[in-house]
Each structure stands twice: as structure tokens, then as C-alpha cells.
Amino acid sequence: MLAVIIPVKDGESTIAGAIQSAWASSADEVVVVADGCLDSTAKIARNLGARVVETGGVGAAAARRRGLEEVAADYVCFLDADDALIPEGVGASLEILRTSAEYIAAGGGVALRYPGGRVTERRTPASITTVEGLLASGVAPWPPGAQVTRRAAVVRAVQSNPPLVEPKFAEDYELVVRLAAIGRIAHHPKLALEYRIYGGRSTRDAFAAVRDREVLRKTYSKTYGTRITVLGRRAMASDALSIAAQHAGANGGHVKGFAYAAAAVLVSPGRRLRKVLKRLQRRPASSVREAAVCVIAPWLQGGGGQRALVGLIARVAPVPVDVIVLFGPSRNYEPVEQAARKLILANLPRNPLGLIRAVGHVRRAQGRYSTVLSLMRGSHVVMGVAPPRISAAALAMSFHQLPSIDDADRHAWLENILVRRAVRGASIVTTPSELGAAQLRARYPFAAQRIVTDPNVLLPLSDRPTVAPGGLQDGEQLVVFSAGRLDAQKGYDLLPRMAEELAPSLPVMFKIAGDGPDRAILQRQFEAVASSNVAIELVGHIGDVAEALDSCHVALLLSRWELNPMFVWEAWSRGRAVIVPNLPVFVELAKRGPLLLMDSHTSLSEMLEKMRDAVHRRKLYTDALSAFAQGQIADSSLVDFLVENSDRGAGRGIERGHEC
């Protein structure tokens, strides 16, 4: 059984979300400790099925212990009233505790939600969950709600010697230190908590919070015999100002944040310099480099570049491949996690500070692996900040979007300078399209000989046998399937107008898989054009695209621009032709398989009318499977480079198979 305990003081605006998230995470009981509440928190909690215990302002730590007395569950989670549990991560923590008796607690990743709506992800290194790591870092591994703990362990930790210090701040830190002292704490990568970033009580009195943390570090370092570096008053003031700077920036007060950051440097320049150097530190250069590939990706969103990466990893086997994802948030990355030897989510913020920290990751990769592959423009920019040295790993770069499209970004001029620097150090630069290669050669003539058109590495979507498109009775709907991010590039906003132009006698069902920023707008537009013969359904993100393709008659891609249309190859792998706009990349790709090009002479309505012919569908089915089979056996310059460079590296004393 799982009990969720929520201590709260005047939390009527957020308590409902916290309680609902607890029930959604399969909590067996929810206890709200209303600690000196003067608002309607208790009433709201009771209405949502929580048990309410009212206390008279005893403080967060005492309120948690009071809630612990009220529950008899085997497992407990302490949730702040302004946070929300994420069911998948809570379930992963419970599974660890139920199957591994050696652990007394388990925690997961944290989704940090900022006031403007931006969300980043943070995951904890294993070293931070030990007593030594906790006392060295001075911070808890995660907010309390990200952790599930055995109730018996909490009771033992609270009652064991030495007595609780119970400072006004850092009470979460004290509990996790005491837990780490009596047992092992597990951690896993699944997100377990949504944590709201705002100016909480520890931010409003940052110096007192840092001071209380130092009191706890000194106390428990003596108790457990752990050596630490004790901070002086100036260093504590610098840390407090740094905390204030981070929270001011998160809440949109960039001028105030800069002022706090400058003051932090002035108060203790040595402290801030050591912090920066620690982030940028890398392992000493070694004459022995691992014969493996490190892929540097800016983020993973489940798109075409990611699917091409999964195929690439399979083709270069048995060469080990590790993947480092620099910036957050990433989502739908599970296929890469399964294919790679190791997936590292750095979850850095997309700002100058995040860029500086990303350079550290790149430098370490350049010194560790025989080969580094920069996957997309975002990582190319970081490579430009940290161009490869002569002694560094061999660098490959892959472009999955037309360079001319990137020029529309407001920071494009600066990014182009950095990408140019990176290209100078690359041994090979690949793109899946002749049009892309032509643009790259025109932009980087000094690297023209190293720029090659390289087809996507293709893997079947499923091991299941393919299914020919089903027959159609009179009046039966033709099913059209599409998949992609719901944004301007994919062109789904064009579909309502096209749907209105369909012949009344042509019943069609459009199914669109994917998600994105335009989902709500598109939903309203699609509902407005729905009729007796036309339906447009948004089905969200789906894990099995093969099943959706097998159940449709034809696929559709309305992109305004494309360079790497992996969805075309996915459709061909299941024997489905694809209707596409008359873009250069599709004209080029139509030479390889069944793409039905829309232009001023051929409308969507005419193509769909023709697709009702069973003989026509059967021919396209055969042509699509043949095109995919030919694509699978195509040579890949990038695969050859990665494998050959690894083999040459092995001859130069590079170690193989070493776990990083």
C-alpha cells in the first residue's frame, strides 16, 4: 500500500492538483496535514477524498511526522502541496522497492515547470544518493515528492541517533541524509514529480536556507565521519545570491537575476569560479581512447532524425554506441534508449549557461571516444563552440533539415558562424537529400569533398507480416493516415481547406498521429469541417505506427518543407503509398518509390478517388515494399566511416567495450 502525505499551509490554490495526482498514482490513502491553515485548504482536501489532520503551525518537518503517524501503509511519499506526482515514475519507484529488499527508498526524475510554462527535466547522479555524496553536495537529490520510501525506514531514520536537528529550512535534506545512513537509495530515469519553480520560502530567505544547510553538513559529517569542505560566511552569502539569481531569472526577472549573479561573483569570486570549473572539468587526456561511437544530440522528440539514429545504431553493431542528449526536455526517446549501449540525458537549459555546460559534455566525449557523431544543428552549434582538437576524436556531422530553413531563426547568423567552425573540423558531413547536399556545398565550399548524400539507415517498423490495403464497399470510408509533429512545418492546417474540396460522394477518414504546439487550434479547425462524408481525427502519440499504417489505405504528408521524411520510408515498409506536396525533396524521392505528388493539375480529391480502385492500391502496395527493400540494402557512407574509424582506432591502442 502507498500513502501520500501532503503537509500544507494555506494551499487552497494548489492542493487539489496535488491530491488528484496522488490518486492518479494509485495511492491507497492520501493524508493532508493542514498546518495552521486559515483558508479553505482542509475543505477542498476532504471533498477530494483525502483524510485531513489539522495542526497549529508546527512546521513542515513536524507536519510530515504527524502525517506519518496517521498511516499504516508499507510505502510513503511526502508531497508538497504545490507539486504533482507523475504516475509512471511513482510506479517505477514502487516496483524497485517491491522487488529489491536491499533498497529502503527509490526516486526518479523531476520535471521542472517554470512560471512561463517552460519545462525541463532533471535526473540525479547515483553518487548523490550516498551519505558522502549528499554531504559533499549539500543538496537533496530531488524534492521529497520524487521519492517513495518504506514507512519503517522513515520511522527508523527519525528515531535513530543523533537526535534530529530540525532546522527551519533544509528539513528535506536532513531526512534524506539520515535515510542514506541506514540503507541504500535507488534512483531511476523515469519522471516521478512535476516540481513548480517559483520563489518559495527558501528563496525568500536564501541566506538562512544556506546557513541551515551548512549546519546540517557540519553536524552529520562529524556523526558519520565524512570529510567535507566547510563554507565560510562569504561563500554562503555567494551561494545565497546565486540561488536568488536563478529564481529571479526563472520568474522573468532577468535584470534582477543578473544583478544577483554579479553580486554573487563580487562577494566570493573564488567560490563562483570553482563552481564553473567543476562544471566544465573533464577527464585528463589519455593516450587510450575507447573504440566506440558517441552520438551528441541536442534533444530527442521522436522525429525522423531520431528514427534514423535507431537504424544507424543497429547497422554499426557490434561497435558500441553511447548517446548524449544535451538539452531538455526530451520525450518519446525510449527506442533510442533500447538501441544504444547507454543514453545520457543532460537536460541542460536552452540558454547561454546551458550552452557552456554542454561544451563540457562535448569536451569529455572528444577525449573519450574514437568517434563523435553530431546529429543535428543544435549539437553542431555546441561543436562550433568547442571545435575538435587535433588529438580529439574523429568527428562526423549529420544534417536532417535544409540549411536554408534554419536561416529564418533570429539567431541564425551567430549559429551559422558556429556551425561553420564545426564543419571545418568534421571528417564527413552527411545529409539524406541531394538538395541538402547542394546547399551544404554552396555554403561550405571548403568542405565540398567531405559532404555526401547518405540515405537513411532503415529498419522495419515491425516483425509482423505486412497487410495489403483492405477492400472498399460502396459508401465505405477510405482511411488516410499521417504522422508528425503538429506544427507549421507539417502543414496540417492546410487539410481543412482540402477536405472542403473533396467530392460529396467521397467518404474519407483522416487519422493523424502526433502532438505539438498547434494541437488545440487544429482540433477546432478539424471539428469545423467535419461532415457526413469527411472526418479528421487526432489520435495523439502512438507507439505502434505499423498497426496504424496496416489499417489505412494510403498515407499522407503535407509538409511545407522537408529534408528527411522518414515517415515516407515507414509507410513504404508497410506497403503504403504516400500522397505528398510537390516539393523538391519529394520529387527526388519519387524516383525511388510510390509517392503521389499533388500539384496544380492533380488535387487531393482526385488522388483519393483513384485510391478507391483496388487494382491501383494493390500495385502501389507491391511498389512500396520493393522501394523499402531496395532502401534497406543501400550503402551508407556514414556507417562505413563509423565502423572503419573504430577499427583503425583499435589498432592505435584504443580500448574496446569500456563502460563510460
Image (cartoon, rainbow, N blue to C red):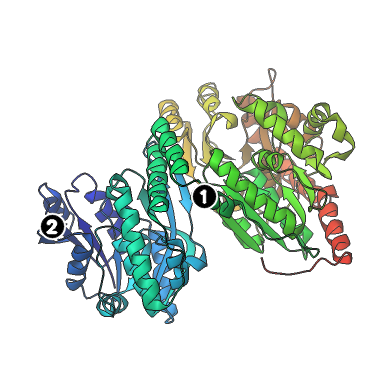
Whether residue 582 sits left or right of residue 517 in the image: it is right
Q: Judge by depth and name the residue closer to the eye, 527 or 374.
A: 374
Q: Is residue 77 above or below residue 357?
A: below
Residue at the top extreme, as displayed = 600
Residue at (46% x, 35% y) in the render: 519
Give, as a three-letter code, the residue at label 2. Answer: Gly
As drawn, the label of residue 499 is: none
Label 2, secondary structure: give it. loop
As drawn, the label of residue 270 is: 1
Residue at (87% x, 57% y) in the render: 644
Give, as a three-letter code, the residue at label 1. Answer: Gly
Q: Position of residue 140 (x, y in %)?
A: 39, 62
Residue at (47% x, 68% y) in the render: 133
Tell me which corner region of the image, top left, top right, bottom left or bottom right, holds residue 20.
bottom left
Whether residue 26 sits left or right of residue 510 in the image: it is left
* Residue denoted by label 2: 57
